[in-house]
Amino acid sequence: MSSNELSLRYDLLNSQMNPHFINNAIQSICNAITKGNVNQSINWLNRLSHLYRLVQKSTKHKLIDLQDEIEISKLYIELQRDLFEKGFAYTIVIDEDLKEDLEHTKVPPLILQPLIENAIVHGLKGMKRNGKGELKISIMLEKEMLYACITDNGEGITKTKKELNEGSGISLENINERLKIINGSTCEQKLLDVRTLRNDGIVAGTQSCLRIPLIQI
């Protein structure tokens, strides 16, 4: 495949992110409004407007600042957290060596969001009423790569890969394909790994990890 064809393919994959992301957020807020949470819903809509502007800006580019990707992720997580009856805890851990270079480190737009969505919507869904859900995002440096992991303490992968793809609207193949394109066809590493975590044989959650080439400008 030529570089031009790869570029067009990447743009197509990128364009799939925006409508799905916004549609799901609006649907969640509409559900809250029907339950009578009007004032809170107005607050959510204001934050969603900010999020929408970031998403619109981001998906026009092949790569965005890691700082913007983290901000989008935080806004999305906090909107979803507020839609849980008792919320959930979340942490974002960033490699110390990266903290000063977030504006100069580039990643594909919305590369983390579908995996965060899977963690919240599928992994933590059973914890909506008890407030015991935990979500952790870690972004580390590993041999000229960014190693990003999204971990939840939910019920593990209870769906097949096909069901996860259909349920999230943005398939895991989409993420993997975008990673392959920016890594190049010669990359032999596993770029996307989704697995159930276990503690003494008991399901302890799900972890989704991405390997993204370290691009700093």
Image (cartoon, rainbow, N blue to C red):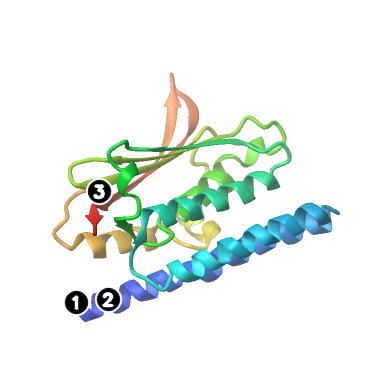
The residue sitting at 69% across, 43% down in the picture is 84
Q: Callout 2, which amino acid? A: Ser
Callouts 1 and 2 close, C-beta under 8 Å: yes
Residue in the picture at 68% in, 39% down: 128
Residue 141: percent from left, percent from top: 26, 41
Of the residues shown, which amino acid type is indicated by label 1?
A: Ser
Residue 123 sits above or below residue 202 on the image: below
User: Mark 2 sits on what residue?
Assistant: 7
Q: Residue at x 33, y 69 (%)?
A: 62
Q: Is residue 49 left or right of residue 56?
A: right
- The tag earlier along the polypeptide, 3 or 1, is 1
Look at the picture and state if 138 lies above or below 64: above
Q: Is residue 129 left or right of residue 175?
A: right
Q: Which numbered tag is attached to residue 3? A: 1
Helix, strand or loop at disc 1?
A: helix
How busy is the neighbourhood of tag 1: few (under 14 within 10 Å), some, or many (20 plus)? Answer: few
Dot 3 alpha-carbon crowd within 10 angstroms: few under 14, some 14 to 19, many 20 or more: few
Sequence-wise, the earlier of marks 3 and 2 is 2
Q: Residues within 10 Å of mark 2 (few under 14, many from 20)?
A: some
- In the rendering, which numbered label is found on residue 187? none
Q: According to the image, label 3 marks what residue?
A: 190
Give the vertical position of 173 relative to 204 (above or below). Answer: below
Q: CA distance from mark 3 to mark 2?
A: 22 Å
Q: Nearer the viewer, mark 3 or mark 1?
A: 1
Task: Work out how far the residue at label 1 is from the one at label 2, CA to CA, in angstroms.
Answer: 6 Å
